[in-house]
């Protein structure tokens, strides 16, 4: 190398895009949910992506045991990528068999009653 040449410096790794980080984080949470709600080793978890508004998209999950939960993503594309990365079954809308599998508890019923007919406060 001569005095006028500059040594080659390896390029710094590009920062990971924010969307990729969110997809990985969501996929990790979705996978945990599936494992937590497995029945006899069956981790089959169904997911439905629901548009909430300009700022959010909801991923509704139904585990093999009928328990349900949700996660919130920034947009539908991020939500769908996370569901795919977690290996869950994605539905455009709730199929009857998935809806029938959902188990609701006292908490959900009291919340629904409070909203509908003046039941317990929903604080």
Image (cartoon, rainbow, N blue to C red):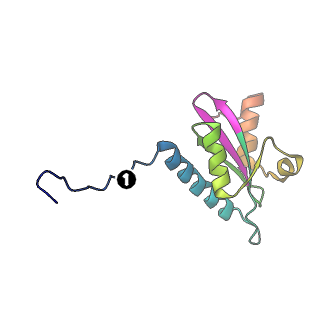
Q: Is residue 123 visible?
A: no
On the image, numbered disc 1 is attached to which residue? 13
* Image quadrant occupied by the N terminus: bottom left
Along the horizontal axis of the image, is 98 left or right of 17? right
Percent position of residue 111, x then y: 71, 38
Along the horizontal axis of the image, is 101 left or right of 33? right
Q: Is residue 80 above or below residue 54?
A: below
Percent position of residue 74, x then y: 57, 37
Q: Is residue 61 visible?
A: yes
Which quadrant of the structure image shows residue 120?
A: top right
Residue at left 39%, top 49%?
A: 14
Q: Is residue 47 above or below residue 110?
A: below
Percent position of residue 42, x then y: 76, 67
Closer-to-camera residue (60/54): 54
Closer-to-camera residue (44/123): 44
Q: Residues within 10 Å of mark 1 (few under 14, many from 20)?
A: few
Would residue 1 be counted in the magenta stretch? no
Which residue appears farthest toward the right when viewing the image? 96
Closer-to-camera residue (113/96): 96
Residue at left 79%, top 52%?
A: 103
Closer-to-camera residue (29/92): 92
Which residue appears farthest toward the bottom when viewing the image? 40
Q: Which residues are magenta?
A: 50-62
Residue at left 54%, top 53%?
A: 24
Which quadrant of the structure image shows residue 38?
A: bottom right
Which residue appears farthest toward the front when viewing the image? 2
Residue at left 76%, top 35%?
A: 113
Prevalent SS, magenta region: strand
Percent position of residue 107, x then y: 70, 46
Q: Is residue 53 above or below residue 8?
A: above
Would residue 51 be counted in the magenta stretch? yes
Along the horizontal axis of the image, is 87 left or right of 16? right
């Amino acid at each position: 190398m001569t005095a006028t040449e500059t040594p080659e410096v390896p390029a710094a790794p590009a920062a990971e895009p924010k969307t990729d980080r969110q997809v990985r984080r969501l996929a990790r949470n979705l996978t945990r949910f599936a494992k937590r709600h497995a029945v006899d080793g069956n981790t089959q978890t169904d997911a439905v992506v629901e548009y909430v508004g300009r700022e959010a998209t909801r991923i509704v999950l139904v585990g093999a045991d009928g328990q349900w939960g949700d996660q919130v993503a920034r947009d539908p594309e991020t939500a769908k990528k996370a569901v795919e990365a977690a290996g869950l079954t994605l539905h455009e809308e709730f199929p009857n068999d998935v809806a029938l599998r959902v188990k609701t508890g006292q908490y959900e019923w009291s919340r629904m009653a409070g909203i509908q007919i003046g039941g317990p406060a929903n604080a």
